Amino acid sequence: MELLGSAYLYTLATLAMTFAGFCAIVIVLRQTTRHGISGFHLVLTRLYLESGLFSAAFCMSPPLLALCGLTETAVWRTSSAIIATVFLCFGATYPMRRAAITTGPVPRARWMPIASVSMLVVVALVSNAAGFPYRPTIGPIAVAATWTLGCGATVFVLALNAVWTDTAETETDR
């Protein structure tokens, strides 16, 4: 069964994988300039790759579930529940995973907007999974996958200068 909006999901998955690959190339190029990878650079690299891979996985889960024979409504509900769970687990463990790699807290001005919008996305996903107050649809899934990739791309653009510098100042300013 061809799902409504699957062309968007396939296109976004392709874009997400291209983004992840491009970011990997940028990090390899950084290493060729004889700069080491600090904890901060490792955090950035992981964020880029995770956002690209998560976004692609979010896009590919509805078609996979449809191939497994789920009804369209069950596809949207199950995909929404899976993505909401990933969002919550990722958000809950991010501070611990970041602290294991680098020192210093994430500045509040950076994480509050991301956490706030991410929680709105989770609420939409949970509502989609529950089928209340609206019938399950592709919308929240497409928004979640787009938001995930958008966050990674935004972090990439904002931190681009930090990729090419070695100063400790970049870590505290981000």
Image (cartoon, helix red, strand yellow):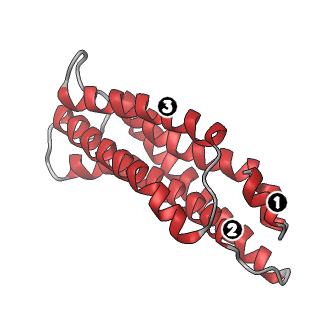
SS at circle 2: helix
Q: Nearer the viewer, residue 113 or 27?
A: 113
Q: Is residue 62 above or below residue 48?
A: above
Q: Is residue 170 left or right of residue 88?
A: right
Query: Percent position (x, y) of residue 24?
Result: 65, 69
Please give the name of the residue rendered at 61% of the width and 67% of the height, measured from the top-left corner: 102
Q: Amino acid at mark 3?
A: Ser
Q: Earlier in the sequence, mark 1 or mark 2?
A: 2
Residue 78, quarter of picture:
top left
Q: Which mark is residue 169?
A: 1
Please give the name of the residue rendered at 63% of the width and 70% of the height, measured from the top-left corner: 42
Q: Residues within 10 Å of mark 1 (few under 14, many from 20)?
A: few
Query: Percent position (x, y) of residue 109?
Result: 66, 37
Q: Is residue 30 above or below residue 71?
A: below
Q: Is residue 100 left or right of residue 34?
A: left
Please give the name of the residue rendered at 53% of the width and 64% of the height, measured from the top-left corner: 99
Q: Are marks 2 and 3 in contact (CB under 8 Å)?
A: no
Q: Is residue 28 above or below residue 116?
A: below
Q: Amino acid at mark 1?
A: Glu
Separation of disc 1 and disc 3 at Cα? 27 Å
Q: Which of label 1 and label 3 is nearer to you?
A: 1
Please give the name of the residue rendered at 30% of the width and 37% of the height, measured from the top-left corner: 3
Separation of disc 1 and disc 2 at Cα? 13 Å
Q: Residues within 10 Å of mark 3 (few under 14, many from 20)?
A: few
Separation of disc 2 and disc 3 at Cα? 25 Å
Query: Percent position (x, y) of residue 144?
Result: 43, 38
Mark 3 sits on what residue?
A: 116
Q: Which quadrant, please, contains the N terminus?
A: top left
Q: Which of label 1 and label 2 is nearer to you?
A: 1
Mark 2 sits on what residue?
A: 41
SS at circle 3: helix
Residue 162, quarter of picture:
bottom right
